Image (tube, grey):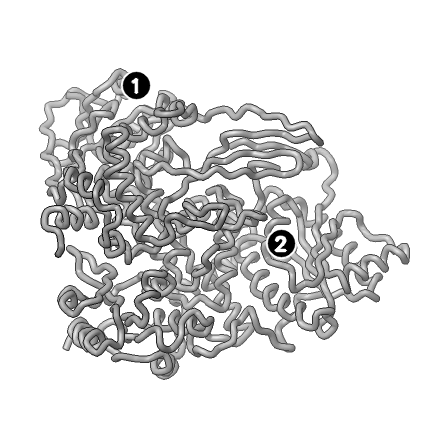
Amino acid sequence: MSVSESLRTEAAALLADGRVTMIIASRRRGHDCVPGFFTNADQLDALDHDPDQQLNPAAYLRKEEIRRQMPVAVVARPAVIRSIVLLAAESQITDDDVVILGVDGQTFHGVLDLAAAAALLKAQYPDLGPDDDVLARVDELNAMSAEERAAFWAEQFAKCTRCYACRAACPACYCTRCIVERNTPQWISTAALEHGNYAWNVIRAFHLAGRCTACGACEAACPQGIPLMLLNACVGRTVEAEFDAKVGYDPEAEPVIGAWREEDKEEYIR
Amino acid sequence: MTEIETTTPAADQAFEPRIVAFVCNWCTYAGADLAGTSRLHYAPNVRIVKLPCTGRIDPLFVLKAFEGGADAVLVSGCHPGDCHYTSGNYHARRRWTIFRQLLAFTGIAPERLFFSWVSAAEGQKFADLINDITAKVHAAGPFEATNPARRKICR
Amino acid sequence: MKALDTAKLSDLAAALAEAGYRVIAPVSDGEVLRLAEWTAGDEIRTDGFAVNSIKDILLPRSEVIASATIDGDAFSLTDVPVEAPKTVALGVRCCDVAALAMLDAVFNWDYEDAFYNARREATTVVALACTTCDEQCFCTSVGGAPDAAPAADAILRPADGGAKLALETQTDKGAALADAAAGVLADLDVKPDPPADVPVIFDAEAVTEWCAGNFESDLWQAVSLGCLGCGACAYACPTCHCFDMQDEGTRTAAVRLRNWDSCGFGLFTQHASGHNPRPEQAHRWRQRVMHKFSYLPERFEVLGCTGCGRCARLCPANVAISEVCRQIDQEAKAPAP
C-alpha cells in the first residue's frame, strides 16, 4: 500500500469511530500538493501524501478554528512530530488533543499517540537537527570576522519586508501578541529598515532557543529567500552543546530557557 | 532616507566610547556605589542602568543599547549563589550564553559585549572592570560604522 | 517597428540609465527574482515571476513621511523631501500595470497623496507582454490580458520566437523613453509572438455579486483554514496598499513612518479596548476577498485583483485567491444545500 492509501484508510477509520473530527493532511491541486483539512469520509479521495512538504502543519494547532475541532489528526514527518511533542511539553496541547499519522518520505509509521510518537523519534530518529550543509555554512560564517558577518547579514536582512511569514509558519510562534506587536513600550521597530529587521530576526531566533525543531518551515516560507535556518542552527547548536538538550523528544521536558543548572557555562563571565 | 543627527560626536573629536551597563541593584550597583564612596577613579564613559536583578535583563535591552549607538554593553550581577532573588542570575546566565553566540554570529563581536559578576563588596573590581573595558573599546574604535543593530533614521 | 534583441535588453537599460533614469527591472540575486534597481552587469529576466511588484516603486515598504526636532518644549517639524527620482519600470508584467488604475484611485480619492503621486509622475512604465504563464496566473478571469497594458507608457512584445522585443509606445512619456533609447532600438520587421493562453477559471462578476449577499457564509471558514495569517500575499500583491503609521524617535528627534500592513495579520483590527472585530482568519479572509471583489469595485469600478498569482506562489500554505474565487463562483451557481 502506498503512503497515500494508508493515510486514506487510517483517516477514514479515525473519522468513522469519532476518534478525531478533522484530519490535517495534504491534497492534490494541479501540479502541487497543498494543505488539506478533512472532516468527512467522502472528502478523503482528495487526500494525498506530500513527501516534499516544507510547511509544518503543527503550526495549525494554534488556530482557534482548528482547536475547536480537537481532537484532530495530523500527518506528521519526524520534524513535525518534534514540534507536536514540544507543544505538549509547553502545555499548548494535551495527549487527548492530537493523533499523529507518522510519515517519513515513503514510509508510513502508523497511527500514534503522543507517547508512541516520542518513542518513535527516540528509537528511529535520535539525531534530528539542521542539515549538514546548513551547519557547514554556519562554520564558514563563524570563520569570518565580525565585520564580514555583519555585512553578510546586512545584505540578507535588507531583503526582509516584515511579512512575518517565518513567524506564521513556525509552530513554536504561538504568542497571541508577539513581541514585535507590543508598543507600550515598543522594543522592535516595525519598519522594514536595517535596525528593525536586525532586531526582529535576531530576537525571533532567540525566542526559539531550546524550542526550534529545525523543520525549516520558516526558511521555506520566506518569500525573499533569507537563510533563516543559519540563525536557528547557530542557536540550536549552542543549546545542544551547552545545555545538553534535544528539543522535541520528551513531552515532559523542562524548557531550556526556563531551567538552569549550577554547572552552566560561565567562563566568559568576568 | 531622513537622518537626524543629535548627539553623535563630530568626527574630529577624539573618540570617547559610549558604554551602557545593565547592572543588578543588590550586587553590582552597590559595588559601583562602593567604588564611588571609596573615591576609586573609573572611566566616566559608562552609563549605568539599574535593574532589580540580572534575571530582569531581557536581551532586547542589550539590542536597544546598540540600536541607540552604544559602542559596547556590559551586563553584570550577583555571583552565582548570591542572587538576592535566589536564582535570577542563573536564569540570566543561560540567556547570555545563547544570546552572545547569536549576536557574535550576526556581527556584534564579543569585544563589544561583556558580562561579569560583581558583588556589593567588590568596588575595586568594578572600577578595574570599567577601566579595562573602556580601554579595550577605545582601542577597538567606534562601533558606529559596523554596528548591525544601529538605528539610522533618527539618532 | 522599433525593436531590439532580447539578449540586448541590458543595453536598453544602460541607455536609459545614461539618460538619467533609475532602472527598476526583474533581476535575480542567484535565487530569487525580484524587481530591483538594475546596475551594469545585471541580467534582466524576461522569464519567471518577480516576488515583488510595481507597487514597491510607488509605495515603498517603509518611508519617512514627517520628521521633527525636539528642543526642550520646542517641537518643530522639518520638511521631508519626497524622494521621486526619474524612474523606469522596465519589463513589468501586464498584471502589474493593471494595478495602477486602482492604486491611482485609492491614493487620490479623499486625499491626494503627495508621496505616491510624485513617484507615479516620475515613473515611466514599460510593460512586458506575456507569451507564457503558469498555473497561478489568472489575469483573464479579472478583466485583464497577458498582452494588453493600457495604463503603461510603453509595452515590450516578445517577437520572432522570443529572440526579439518590439517596443510599442502608448503615451508621451513612453515616446520620450523611446527617444532616449533610440541608440539601441532599430526599425525591424518582427512578428510579435502569440500571447500566453491564460484560461478563465472563474466569473469575477459572479464573485462580486455573491459577496454582496453572503457576508455570514460558512464558506469563509472553509476556504481560510489553511491560512497562517502572515503578510506575504498582501505585501507581494500589486494592488494591496494598507499601511501602518509608526512614530520613532529619541528625546531630541522624531520621525513618522508609513509601513506596509496586512489585513491578514491577527491584530490588524485590534482595538485599544481589546476588542477585535475580525478575531479569526475566516473574518480576515472575508475582508480580503470582499475588499478586492466587492468594496473596491463598488467605490472605484475597478477590481482589487489583477490575477498576477504572486500571492499563491509565495503563500507558505499554498492558499490561492483564485481557488477561493472558483469555489465562490461554484457556490454562486449551485449553492450547497
Where residue C70 sits, quadrant-wise, is top right
* Subunit of label 1: C
Q: Nearer the viewer, residue C66 or A106?
A: C66
Q: Which residue is mark 1?
A: C180
Say above or below: A208 vs C122.
below
Q: Where in the figure is residue C219, as x and y percent of width and height?
A: 22, 53
As helix, strand or loop, the secondary structure at mark 1 comes to helix
Q: Nearer the viewer, residue B64 or A22?
A: A22
- Left or right? Give the position of A24 relative to A95: left
Which numbered dot is residue B62? 2
Where residue A88 sits, quadrant-wise, is bottom left
Q: Amino acid at mark 1?
A: Ala
Q: Residue at x 24, y 56 (%)?
A: C222
Label 2: few (<14), some (14–19) or many (≥20) C-alpha neighbours in 10 Å: many
Taking the view exactly as shown, the residue that stands out farthest to the right is: B38
Where residue B125 sits, quadrant-wise, is bottom right
